Amino acid sequence: MRGVGAVGGFLAGRVDRGGFLAQRAGVAGAAVLAVAALIALLAPLLIPADALDVTRVTDGAWQPPGPGHWLGTDHTGRSVALLMAQGTGTSLFVGLTAAVLAVGIGTLVGILSGHFGGLLAGALLRVTDFFLVLPALVLAIALSTVLPRGLGTIILAIGLTSWPSTARMVRAQTLTIEARPFVERARALGGGHTHVIGRHVLPSVVPLVLVNATLAVASAIVAESTLAFLGLGDPTRISWGAMLHQAQLHGAVPQRAWWFLLPPGLAIVVVVLAFTLVGRALEAVVTPKR
Amino acid sequence: MRLAGRFGGAALSLVMVAVLGFFLFRVVPGDPVVSMTRGRPTTAAMQAELRAQFGLDRPLPEQFWNYFTSLLQGDLGTSFTFRRPVADVILERLGPTLLLVGTATLIAVGLGLWLGVRAAWRRDSGFDRVTTGVSLTLWAVPTFWLGMLLMMVTGDLFPSRGMRDTDTAPDFVSQALDVGHHLVLPSVTLVAVVCAEYMLVMRSSLLEEMHAPYLTTARAKGLRDDVVRRRHAVPNAVLPAITLVFLRFGLVVAGAITTETVFSWPGLGLLFYDALTGPDYLLLQGLLVVTAGAVVVMNLLADLLHGVLDPRVKVV
């Protein structure tokens, strides 16, 4: 896994303006995400509860794709296609909320350390750099091990470990903006911290933050799948990572049950790639041409 | 002055790693003994004994002092599951991880940088589009899934569990061949994911240099295109890329955890998995401190190396 939050960094500040092609890829990514969101919203409404109840399924275990279960069945006889649809919501939800948490912390720390100089900025910068180099997955594993298992823990574990790259970027942007004459003018006219941050710094930081958030979702989804694969997920919920955990646990590889291994992984790749493409396209749009 | 600052910063980071380890495993869980024995029948007496054994019945500052002083002496406590000193268990698993991570990193750095240079130099060419597309896709692939997939696709071609067979002849050559055979799938998995990121980093680093005036000068001197690339552009672009490779060492660590778990490679990553399924807090804490410490040291090395390789850094 890309060290949970280690994404955005290399894209930030080194914009690769792919031009029209990148924009088209971004649109394709957005379309994929729209479909995924639709599936996530409809799945809980359309799938009858007993279809995914291990005690009530009628199909045999490890059935290859065929009529009635067109993506085959898992080790308990549940339809892989239904599991996939049901898991979409969990993976997207965790990805989005963890990204919002990470980017929120990152933005706050970034603005604070950029706006206020002195000891506070020094300390915040020190902490940011410290967490930036630490392997985020290791920290996320530690956090999810010591906290009780659940969706909240996963979100917390990913969010609390993947904010530093955002913080760095927002700080750099804050410093750039605050060096501009109009901010100096605002200060001279008596604008306080709230005014400068709220009216000048924040609006200039928002586009960057949006790009970063999109990329953070991509990395958070991979992170969720990794934690779930290691058995640290919410045991009561179906997610793509949790399905792969089951696949590993119950020997899908030696069983050659490709239908249980391929779909969850492919779904993760497609959705993560879609978020990455949208992020890159957004980045090309919001970054002013040099 | 700069050197002293770097060493001081690294030392401070190491102390922060130690504090983090303490905080995560003794403060966050509330009562570590309760979560440690979760799911196992335990009596109050047993819990009290465990608490005394781990020193958890003492006030926090005293606990921290004991923890920190023994850490300085290389004592990471005793593993709950292995019933042996954590430091010994970790040392024992270091070799296989170094072998896997070392092999994979060398290949990934070489391949990634080479691909990145090619792609950036012929920007928007077919080669660039394909390698960038493949890299972005690989970046989205969960490492563990790629490993499982490779295992399924290759079938019986390569061994998929452990590091060596028990029935291999004890002489060096057959042992080395056996380990090499076992090494193929895990290192391919790790290389694929890590290499993608290195390629993207190298590509954007070289793209930054592409319009630098010194390249125009070099061309104006009548140098051939690949001489301009090899002698002028790449040496300048490779420095930030190399630094990023070191900075992203955490990525390799993360990859090693899942790869080793999938392939039962008997290294630190698998030990991580064992520790978290336990859960074996002291072992996990030891692993966290050791890997995070290693990452801090790697960063210091990257800094020093950068200073040696790039004379411009000294000026700043």
Image (cartoon, grey):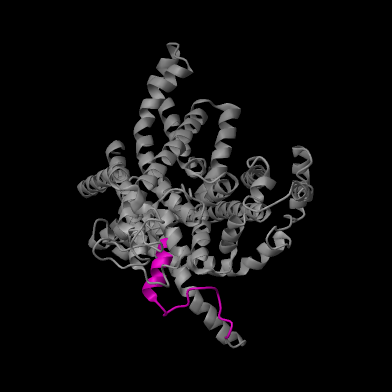
- Which quadrant of the structure image shows residue B302? bottom right
Q: Residue at x 44, y 30 (%)?
A: A174
Is residue B152 one of those drawn in magenta?
Answer: yes
Identify whether A171 is placed above or below B233. above
The answer to whether residue B89 is left or right of residue B165 is: right
- Which residues are the magenta region? B145-167
Tell me the residue at 35%/66% (across/down).
A60
Q: Name the side, left or right, on which B243 lies relative to A275.
A: right
Q: Please provide percent x and percent y for residue B27.
A: 66, 40
Q: Can residue B229 be seen in the rendering of this structure?
A: no
Q: Quadrant of the N terminus of chain B?
A: top right
Residue A207: % across, % down: 34, 33
Q: In the displayed structure, would residue A156 be above or below residue B302?
A: above
Q: Could you say which is closer to the camera, residue A228 or residue B209? A: A228
Q: Position of residue A170 (x, y in %)?
A: 44, 34
Choose top left, top right, bottom left or bottom right for residue B64: top right
Nearest the camera: A198 or A59? Answer: A59
In this rendering, the answer to whether A55 lies above or below A125 is below
Of residues B93 and A126, the one nearer the viewer is B93
